[in-house]
Image (spheres, grey):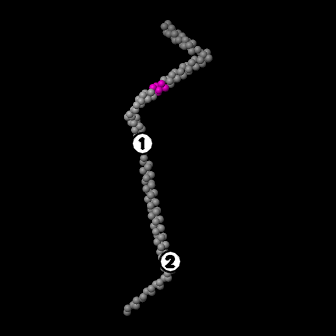
Amino acid sequence: MMKKKIKKKKKPRLNYDEEEETKIKKKKRRRRRRRRLRRRNKDLEEEKKKKKKKKKKKKKKKKKKKKKEYKKKQRFRYRRRNKDLGVGEETKIKEKKKKKKKKKKKKKKKKKKKKKKKKKQRLRRRRIQGKDGNETKIKKKMKKNKIKKKKTK
């Protein structure tokens, strides 16, 4: 025997208000999904940026400063050596050298004066103590002569 086909009941048509509500719900669902995706993408992008930043920092650490300073000094020396002297430049250089020599001579003279002053002060102190510089020298000579005389005997 053949089974009777059961007819499916058609869904009753929703009222206008209910249809609109379903549309609104679908829209909300879509929005939520989009937001979720956006957030996920943002998080991924931020992680990528952080990784890139870390790599850049490592590159910065490798730089060395000492070599650059040395190169600068070398360049400066080279420039000075090969400098084209303009009009009157040579005479200026000569004058500077003369001034330096004069300063050195003055310093030497001052040193000599200081030495003389110190010597005089020493002698003055001895005189005050009752030891005259010349007297002590004479006594020393006498002693030496006595020793020589003894040897001749």
Residue displayed at 42% across by 42% down: 68
Query: Which one is in front, 19 or 48?
Result: 19
Q: x%, y% of residue 80?
A: 40, 35
Report the residue that reaches farthest toward the bottom. Answer: 1
Q: Residue furthest front?
A: 87
Relative depth, front residue between 25 and 8? 25
The mark found on residue 68 in the picture is 1
User: From this viewpoint, which residue is outermost toward the top?
Assistant: 153
**Left or right placement of residue 18 versus residue 5 in this view:** right
Q: Which residues are magenta?
A: 97-103
Give the crowd class for mark 2: few <14, some 14-19, many >=20 residues within 10 Å: few
Tell me, yes or no, whether the two marked residues, 1 and 2, touch with CB atoms within 8 Å: no
From this view, report whether residue 107 is shown above or below residue 2: above
Name which quarter of the figure residue 116 lies in: top right
Q: Amino acid at mark 2?
A: Glu
Q: Pick whichever of labels 1 and 2 is earlier in the sequence.
A: 2
Q: Is residue 53 visible?
A: yes
